[in-house]
Image: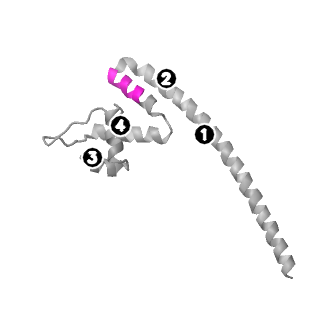
């Protein structure tokens, strides 16, 4: 699969795909005889994984560390698991913070809505 196809499939820019490969986030992608990247299903799996993890807020540095550990083989299984356990803990904390922010926004919106209703009532009374 060419880079344009992968870019469209995963809604990731071609520059981002090249960057991910350059920094080792995606293992080196094979190239065809013309030197054009030829993504395999395994390469696409990496792209999907990275996009998912980035979407959840995992830092690039953590993902680079994970890929490095993965490439070292099964002796790093526990280290990889611990890396994800810690990221999960941090994600839960961020989600709790976001929930508090959402509740505060809901409260503020309700106050604005109540003020708008009161203002409309006042305007209606003054027109009578």
Q: Determine the image quadrant of residue 18.
A: top left
Callout 1–callout 3 Cβ contact below 8 Å: no
Cα–Cα span, label 1 and label 2? 20 Å
Upstream in sequence: badge 4 or badge 3: 3
Upstream in sequence: badge 2 or badge 3: 3
Nearer mark to the viewer, of 2 and 3:
3
Upstream in sequence: badge 1 or badge 3: 3
Cα–Cα span, label 4 and label 3? 12 Å
The image shows residue 19 at horizontal and vertical percentages of 34, 38
Q: Which residue corresponds to mark 3?
A: 3
Q: Which residue corresponds to mark 2?
A: 82
Above or below, 39 relative to 115:
above
Q: How many marks?
A: 4
Q: Which residue corresponds to mark 4?
A: 20
Q: What range of the chain is rendered magenta?
A: 64-72
Q: Label 4: how many residues lie within 10 Å, few (<14), some (14-19) or many (20+)?
A: some
Cα–Cα span, label 4 and label 2? 23 Å
Question: Front-most of 77 and 50?
Answer: 50
Nearer mark to the viewer, of 1 and 3:
3
Disc on res. 95: 1
Above or below, 108 relative to 34:
below
The image quadrant where one finds the C terminus is: bottom right
Above or below, 34 relative to 109:
above
């Amino acid at each position: 699969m060419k880079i344009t196809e992968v870019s469209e499939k995963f809604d990731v820019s071609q520059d981002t795909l090249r960057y991910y490969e350059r920094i080792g986030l995606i293992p080196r992608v094979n190239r065809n005889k013309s030197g054009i990247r030829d993504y395999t299903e395994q390469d696409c799996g990496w792209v999907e994984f990275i996009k998912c993890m980035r979407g959840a807020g995992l830092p690039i540095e953590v993902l680079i560390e994970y890929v490095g550990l993965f490439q070292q083989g099964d002796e790093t299984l526990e280290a990889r698991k611990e890396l994800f356990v810690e990221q999960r803990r941090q994600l839960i904390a961020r989600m709790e913070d976001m929930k508090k922010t959402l509740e505060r926004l809901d409260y503020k919106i309700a106050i604005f809505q109540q003020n708008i209703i009161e203002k409309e009532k006042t305007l209606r009374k003054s027109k009578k």
